[in-house]
Image: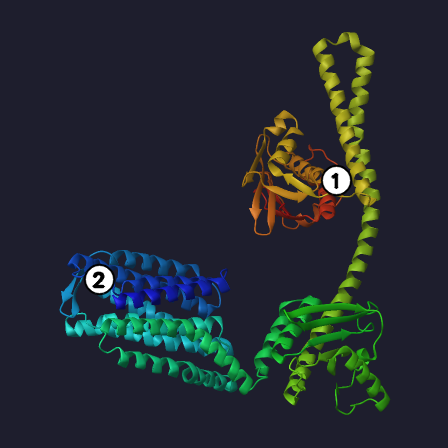
Amino acid sequence: MVKFIITVFEALTILALAWLVLRSHRERFLNRSFALFLLFLALWVLCGFPQNLLSEPSDRFLTLVFRLAHCAAILATGTFFLFALAFLRGERPGEGWRWITVTSMIAMAACSVTDLVIREASQAGTGYRVEGGSLYNLFVAYMVLFGFGGLCAVALKRSRSMSTDRARATYILLGFGLFLALALLLVVALPEIMGRDATSDYIFFLVIIPIAFTAYAILRHRLLDVRLAVRRSFAYLLTLLLFGTPLLALYLAFRFTLTSYPDLEMGASVIMLALAIALAPTALRLSNRLAAKILFSGLYDEVELLHEVSAVFTSTANIREGLISATGLVCSHLRLSKLLVAIPDESTRGKGNWVIGSTATPGGIDGFYDLEAADSMLFHLWDTVLVEDEGPVGIGDQVAVAARIEMRARGLAACLPVKGPAGKMAVLLVGEKVNRLALDPVDLDFLGQFAERAGIFIENYLLSSYLLSQFEELSEARRRLEESDNFKTDIINVTSHELRTPLTVLNGYTLMLHDHYERFDEEERKRYLEYIASSCERLNAILDQFLTVSYFQRGTAQASAKPTDLEELFEELKSAFVPDQSKRIESEVRPSHLTVLTDRSYLLLMLNNLVENAIRFSPEGSPVMVRAEKADDGVQISVRDHGRGLDSGDVQYIFQPFTRLEETDKHRIGTGLGLYIVRLVADLLGIEVNVESEPESGTTFHLRLPAA
């Protein structure tokens, strides 16, 4: 019974660790696979001593327990292998590896609960007699292959990694390498040699050590250098001295006192074990805090931290985001009250004095950004390293005195120049340490290296920003000139062509009815009047398009974003077309009642032009699909036709005004403004429009909108 209680406690501990691992980063495959491994391992631990609940367990019950234990072991080994692959790659393993591992794991686990792996298990004195099935050797091979395969993946990760990942891999290898070796020895090797299973019970008590050790390494442990290793070793010694020794003495006292009372002795042992497991993390945490105050209180790894800073600078092109993240890292590790980068007006090319960085608050490290109007002398210490309580470097005494007065007012401990390859860029403003200690030479050396990397990052941003702004201004000026010139020419050509046809129809049929009204029967008169009405509608549509374009080009259009039900909008869209065209429009919304946050009337205008364009360039009777579906970052609306499609070189021009897609078919009509209006509305609403098209495969327009 006691053994079963201990294993239940171990299983609950493992489940708690699984919850912690999953809670830290539930979106990462690495954490999910490790948490799943812990779950299966907890189930395996629970299979340790359920037979102790029965006074005389039957052979059938023992066989079931052994089968479940082997099944849980297969599942745990397979998920450990997936975790090791993810740890090696730094991301989700390939689909082939996942398919092979999961398929073989499920198949082997299914076989483990049948007589194919364990045919029968029975009590044999103090041990068990286990008769393996026809696939027992395959079970052993699977455990060896995937178990040691996972350890090989971790070992390969260790050989390729530095610092933190190398330390994690070391802990995993030590913990699980020892555990898997003992498992094979106690569960497989010794029972085969002895002819009976009298050793596998011990492995259930050893499982908590490597699991807790590895989980701690993954979630919390950061091995930076030898000093940190010394400090952690010292913390372990403190834990043993201040926590382990008194607990052991108390346990021995209870044991010798209660020798005559075996039940009380066993109860006291269980209580002491529970206290040891429950209080060990707290004791270790307190020991780490005490060790951090005694040994290397300002410890950080300069190379690792500089590497993290460089990674931040290379991962973003946003100067505010990059400097805030990088200075936040440095503030946290160096325990600085603030770390700011002052970029003066002359570096920003007249855009003001930018002050970007991070400050320490009781709640953590907060990003800081300010646009200072007043010009400080500290912003122009281009060639000076000014440290509080040290002599001036490169500047006069009076300037140094004035600078130090301002430094004290701002709570700064040092100012360092920030230079890029082209020269001066900014000034690094270093705040005082939180613990009131002075900056040591190691800190200043690291901050100098940080300033070099920040200078390159700032120069690249400012230069690219300046060149981009100049290029955009030139491109915009050229575009406006070309668009204005082309617009004048195209509007003359289009109006002369598009207005001539309906006017000719109007004039011809009107004169025919006027001069020969009595010669036509009622059916002919009705048909001619329909021709006249159709021409009027065409003229009205042309004028509406011109007025819409003029309305947008004047810049007076304003949007009002409101929640819009897409199912209702699609029904309204269909009703805007004549019955023959409306029947061709097929709509779908997934999930139903999907809503977006936009201007309903303008979105309807966009879709109307897209659908009209799709109907015009599709074969007669072919469907036009309008679909809305949930996307990762909003809602995607698609309009697809089955027309002739576009060449890849033509896609970039279709949103230009007066682009005539019907040039490929002279019998079709249009002003060439429909997709131009789509572009104008998309710019107004901030909608992203993408086009997918291939010759003879149709065209699909994708609209990306925010969900309501």
The residue nearer to you, when weighing 542 against 631, is: 631
Q: Residue at x 30, y 66 (%)?
A: 5
Q: Quadrant of residue 172?
A: bottom left
The residue nearer to you, when weighing 59 against 469, is: 59
The answer to whether one can see residue 421 in this image is no
Left or right: where does residue 267 sit relative to residue 637? left
Residue 415's x, y, as percent?
Answer: 75, 82
- In the rendered view, would you say 274 is above or below 705? below
Left or right: where does residue 150 sit relative to residue 167? left
In the rendered structure, are the residues bearing label 1 and label 2 in contact, judged by CB atoms less than 8 Å apart?
no
Q: Quadrant of residue 324?
A: bottom right
Residue 314's x, y, as percent?
Answer: 63, 71
Q: Secondary structure at mark 1?
A: loop
Residue 247's x, y, as percent?
Answer: 37, 80
Amino acid residing under circle 1:
Leu
Residue 175's x, y, as percent?
Answer: 37, 75
- Packing grade of label 1 (10 A; few <14, some 14-19, many >=20) is many
Separation of residues labelled 1 and 2 (CA atoms): 81 Å
In the picture of the structure, the residue carrying the numbered disc 1 is 673
- In the rendered view, would you say 333 is above or below 40? below
Work out which residue is located at the far bottom of the displayed protein and give it.
391
Which of the image's four quarters has the C terminus?
A: top right
Q: Which mark is residue 182?
A: none
Left or right: where does residue 241 sit relative to residue 259? right
Q: Quadrant of residue 326?
A: bottom right
Mark 1 or mark 2: whose residue is earlier in sequence: 2
- In the rendered view, would you say 484 is above or below 398? above
Q: Residue at x 15, y 59 (%)?
A: 59
In the picture of the structure, the residue carrying the numbered disc 2 is 51
Which of the image's four quarters has the N terminus?
A: bottom left
Q: Secondary structure at mark 2?
A: helix
Amino acid residing under circle 2:
Gln
